[in-house]
Image (cartoon, coloured by chain):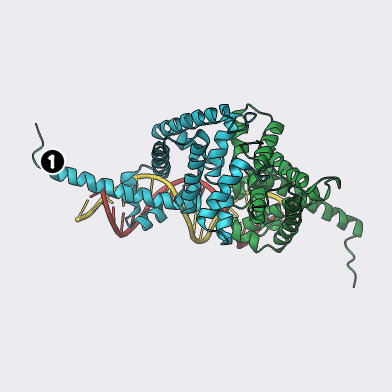
Chain colours: A cyan, B green, C yellow, D red
Amino acid sequence: MLPTEIPSKKHSFKQQQLQFRETAILDTVNQLLSQKGFDLMTMDEVAANVGIAKASLYKHFASKEALAAACMTRLLERALDTVHDLPDTNSAVENLRAVVRWAVSTHLQGTMPLLPSTRSTIQSALQNHAPYMQALGKLIEQFAKWIHEAQSKGELSVTLPSEVVLYTLFARSCDPVADFLKQGGAFTDHEITELIVETTFQGMVGQA
Amino acid sequence: MLPTEIPSKKHSFKQQQLQFRETAILDTVNQLLSQKGFDLMTMDEVAANVGIAKASLYKHFASKEALAAACMTRLLERALDTVHDLPDTNSAVENLRAVVRWAVSTHLQGTMPLLPSTRSTIQSALQNHAPYMQALGKLIEQFAKWIHEAQSKGELSVTLPSEVVLYTLFARSCDPVADFLKQGGAFTDHEITELIVETTFQGMVGQA
DNA sequence: GTCTATACGAGGATAGAC
DNA sequence: GTCTATCCTCGTATAGAC
């Protein structure tokens, strides 16, 4: 027995509207997560900013954790897109620098949800969210490749364990230095980004 | 009219006990602040860990904010002590490295309260707490001196604005890289500390 | 100045009408 | 699947006895 009351055209339109609203929700969450982090973000706030009732939020996402996980997954997929769009002509280090540049500048625009520090309650929710973990795995795999290549070419210190490089890349994406410098008001977003990329790769001592 | 009922000896003893308990409270808070940060730390937890009733806590400190501020002030005073105890033979850069080393290793021991990121609610409470701001001012002054000296000697990149160096010093004290590496279990605390100090000053590229 | 008990608000989540 | 109204837990802070 086929359903008779809903033509497929209207169904597709409904689906689109649903999709549209979920995108709006995730945009709001993305913004709030970058401004206040998971623990300080409230569902009331999310609902108010989206312009819907809190109960409606729970029709789209089962919990605050699920909402944050969806948002973080979307972020990782965007990161993968960014990585994919890098020019083939880049060296491995140039790619790594480009990723940090993208992350810091996203952070400065206020659209970089705080990456799960060891001190937030999302941490475990993320680890149980398969799509997030899968995207993260892909990203890490790509980074590991570049790190290895850069080290074998001498573009990156060989004495540095690759984990240190990997974690440093992630950590710089939410480096509070960016916030402090922005708050100071003496630099443009672009200048701040370059300063952080530079200190990350060249250090504060600079070239001898 | 002098008080008659309390001999000065007993009074002093009472004072000592009070001091002792407050130290115990601050030790607990210090530990909890480094494990969970301000927003996730609860007063129930503090009271339980100290072994006193929550109401008693409020006899010593007026609010959660006041408690955190006292703890952070004590931390800054310890930092000042550390700075003061550095050998005179050190160069400016060596002093800066020593400070980062102290901070990271304190962090790894679980006794480094998270420095006020722009995303916590303590931020404003700290700015209104005179003792904290005064200690912070002294520390910044000393750092600024060393940064200037190091740059004029060419021990630190001259193209780097001093604010960037200053903020980076503070940021590395609560660098999540340390937590990630510790969680990985592949390195000792000492190794982690040296890796972070090294990447902070020499960068990931290393010496050409 | 320590305790037990409680007031009070905030926030995550749900009920039930439309 | 959107709304209003409500539940319930947790966390800050205080009251009041000893």
- In the rendered image, is residue A40 in sight? no
> In x, y percent, where is residue B18?
79, 53
Mark 1 = which residue? Answer: A8
- In the rendered image, is residue A158 in sight? yes
Q: Report the chain holding disc 1.
A: A
Say which of A44 and A98 sits in front. Answer: A98
The quarter holding residue B130 reads bottom right
> In x, y percent, where is residue C6?
54, 56
Placement of A111 over or under B200, stated as above or below: below
Is residue B66 toward the left or the right of residue A144 in the image? right
- Give the quarter of the figure containing the N terminus of chain A: top left
> In x, y percent, where is residue B27?
72, 46
Is residue B85 toward the left or the right of residue A19 in the image? right
> In x, y percent, where is residue B179?
61, 37
Identify residue type, mark 1: Ser
Say which of C9 and B36 sits in front. Answer: B36
